[in-house]
Image (cartoon, helix red, strand yellow):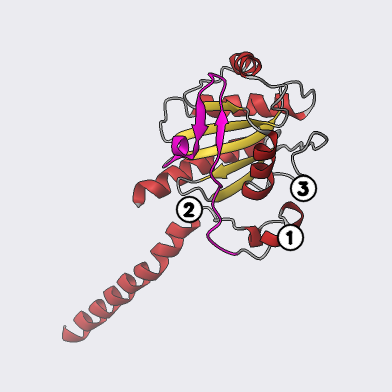
Amino acid sequence: MKRYRWIILAFLAIWVGGMFIVYPKLRDRDRLPIYNPADINPKLVDTDMQRTGMNHRIADFSLTDQTSTTVTNADVAGKVYVADFFFVTCPSICPKMSKNMSDLALQFKGESRVMFLSHSVFPDQDSVPVLAAYGAKYNADPAQWKLLTGPKPHIYELARRSYFAVTTEGDGGPEDFIHTENFVLVDPDRRLRGFYDGTNPDETRQLGEDIKKLLREYEKE
């Protein structure tokens, strides 16, 4: 009997030890990667940032939404959010992006921990009234989905050096223009957690699932 008891105890010890090894790995599989400049396609990253391997955060910003309200980092503090770049008169990718963003916003309607930030790349033309009309077309709730305008150099620097959403170079000057289908997922610590084709419904659905993953991740912390 003693022999069998030791065999059982040994089996339990191995089983418990295995759980301590395996469970964290299973749990980590549900965590999204954290992207730093060194992890991203170099074509999307300015040369001076390409070797940055940790601690990248979205830079401070101050922009104006479709209700003339100033929006800053403080408004997304502690929230999961999705950022994209568009312009109201865009005839190609932007209507698809806005439709998919609208679907995402509806999916998370009333979820106070989730927000959406759409930055105009034609901020001079996309004034507050223009953004308000565009938002109404896509049922954008200003409390959760912010359509943003502001100084062009500020928006373009965010796109290129914070969100890494575009491959082009420029200074945000009058002749500069960016056009991208990317949706960028950001966590409550202002870290990059995912990149998605905002014109693709399948990728948009995956983004919805990844938002849920991030919410679960922060519930555990």
- Residue wearing tag 3: 167
Examine the image and state in which quarter residue 37 appears.
Answer: bottom right
Q: Does the magenta stretch include residue 121?
A: no
Residue at 39% x, 48% y: name it. Answer: 218
Q: Where's residue 6, x and y in %? A: 22, 83
- Residue wearing tag 1: 47
Cα separation, mark 1 vs mark 2, equals: 32 Å
Q: How many labels does the image show?
A: 3
Label located before the other in sequence (3 or 1)? 1
Q: Where's residue 105, x and y in %? A: 53, 27
Label located before the other in sequence (2 or 3)? 2
How dense is the environment of label 1, judged by Cα within 10 Å: few (below 14), some, or many (20 and up)? few
Residue at 35% x, 69% y: name it. Answer: 20
Q: Nearer the viewer, residue 171 or 184?
A: 171
Is 206 left, or right, of 142 in this rendering? right
> Which-is-in-front pick, marks 3 and 1?
1
Label located before the other in sequence (1 or 2)? 2
Q: In this view, does 119 lie above or below 14?
A: above
Magenta portion: prevailing SS class = loop
Tag 3, which secondary structure? loop
Q: Which of 9 and 32 is in front in this view?
A: 32
- Marker disc for residue 30: 2
Looking at the rendered structure, the kind of residue marked 3 is Thr
Looking at the rendered structure, the kind of residue marked 1 is Thr
Q: Nearer the viewer, residue 99 or 59?
A: 59
How dense is the environment of label 2, judged by Cα within 10 Å: few (below 14), some, or many (20 and up)? few
Examine the image and state in which quarter residue 83 appears.
Answer: top right
Looking at the rendered structure, the kind of residue marked 2 is Asp
Q: In this view, which residue lies farthest toward the right?
A: 175
Q: What stretch is highlighted in magenta?
A: 53-77
